[in-house]
Image: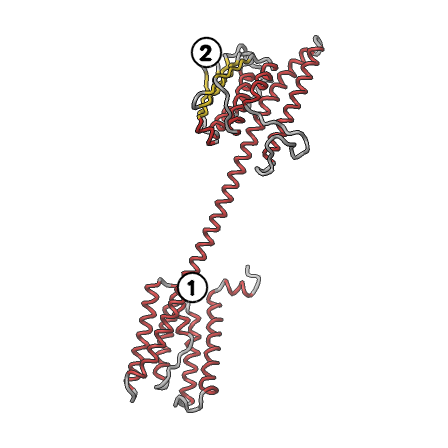
Amino acid sequence: MPTTMNDHIEGRPFVRDCLLAASVAALTFTLLAALFWVVTPPDAFALTPAREWLLVCLAVGQALLLCLRRVRPLVCLAAVVGVQVVMIASSPPDATIRGFAPFVVAYTIGGLLPARRSFALVGAAAAVETAAAVGTAAAGSSGLLLPAVGPAGSSVLSYLGGAFVGSYVATHRRYVRLLRQQAAEAVRTQQAKVRAAIGAERTQMARELHDVAAHHLSGMVVQAAAVQQLIDRDPAAAKEGVAWIRAQGKATLDNLRLVVGVLRAGPADRTDGDGPDPDGEGAIPVPGLAVLDELVGTARDLGTPVECAIDGTPRPVSPIADVALYRTVQEALSNARQHAPGAPVQVTLRYLPLAVSLAVVNAPPARRPEPAVRTSSGVGLVGMRERAKLIGARFAAGPTADGGWSVTVTLTDNGGERS
């Protein structure tokens, strides 16, 4: 809803055109009145007062026709040309009386219509006025050439000049509009990228939190169940179990602090791992293949018989690949503990000439896991597959021939560099 007079006028082009027509009419009347009765001597144009008033009224009426310049542009052009023909016939032989309306209507035609059509129309208008000037000169007593040159030249300048300016302004406006649309599209694209990046960060956070919860908390649930059974008959063993749960709880908090710190800090704020964290505490080492033995040892403490073998000469991989491979082993051991409790697990890390291969294979479960222990959310395999895709590695998971389960990740050297 319009709140100001300017908003009200902007929303109604006809009202704006009427105001423009009134302004042009007032300016035309002022200039012609000054020309006839102030600036020039009384007998300069050899016109009677009645003819002078006729020319002034025709010019003012011609200006008022500009009310139709956008609602009926062709009608407005024809009417302006018709009035101008009458003004040419009524003008003195040695002068041509012309207002501002022809230029304004030509400007409008040039801005509203395609260039070829607009120049054809204003060219026709100039030709009509030139023919009228020639006819008026032929009817007079003087020669044909000189009386016709003035009206013809002014017609060409008014119509063709106005159409050129209008066409240029319209082209510039379209260009500016296109730039604004492109800028708006760029903003929308950037916003979409930001939303996608936020979604990716949320997915990463969910994956990291799932890995921490699946590895540490599931082990704590298993150990707590064992402590509950030992607390009466073997208090010493129960105390050891409680101490282990406490240690795992601290490890869980450390890992959660690592995840939150990585997601909270920007790339420029993250340290290289050797300095203190933003909270003033010691830096928490990022998990990777270098601490794979600790991960295997933790799994053994939870009662899973795990063997780890490393073939080939260890070599560094990219940081993202290092964490991804570690998390894959962590998730695979957690799944084996939940779905195949007590089954032997073999972790094999091979450093091949052009690739790094990781395999986690567990034997068939000796017994069905208890419901309290089966805490998997079903997104572990999805997370491992997404991690492998992130680092450009091949991922495979599925049952083995003897009823066990196998998880393999193969990272080529090109994939590690791309990560």
Under mark 2, the amino acid is: Asp
Helix, strand or loop at label 1? It is helix
Mark number, residue 169: 1
Query: Where's the N terminus, which quadrant?
Result: bottom right
Task: Check the image and report above or below for 38 versus 70.
Answer: below
Locate residue 391, reporting x and y percent.
Answer: 48, 29
Work out which residue is located at the far top of the displayed protein and give it.
233
Which of discs 2 and 1 lies nearer the camera? The answer is 1
Q: Amino acid at mark 1?
A: Val
The residue at the point 48 percent across, 64 percent down is: 12
Residue 335 position, x and y percent, is 54, 19
x 62%, y 30%: residue: 274
- Could you tell which of marks 2 and 1 lies nearer the N-terminus? 1
What whole-number distance in Å separates the C-alpha atoms at marks 2 and 1? 80 Å
Residue at figure coordinates x 44%, y 71% from the top left: 67
Between 66 and 275, which is closer to the camera in this rendering?
275
Is 346 rendered above or below residue 287?
above
Task: Name the colouring of the figure.
Answer: secondary structure
Seen at 54% across and 32% down, the residue is: 204
Measured as percent of width and height from the top left, residue 182 is found at: 45, 51
The numbered mark at residue 288 is none
Q: Is residue 214 left or right of residue 163?
A: right
Spot occupied by residue 86 in the image (x, y as percentages of width and height): 35, 80
> What label sits on residue 402 in the rendered view?
2
Element carrying mark 2: loop
User: Seen in the image, is 150 located left or right of residue 330?
Assistant: left
Foreground pick, 145 / 232: 145
Asked if 387 appears above or below 17 in the picture, the reply is above
Binning the other alpha carbons within 10 Å of mark 2 as few (below 14), some (14 to 19) or many (20 upward) gives few
* Quarter residue 252 falls in: top right
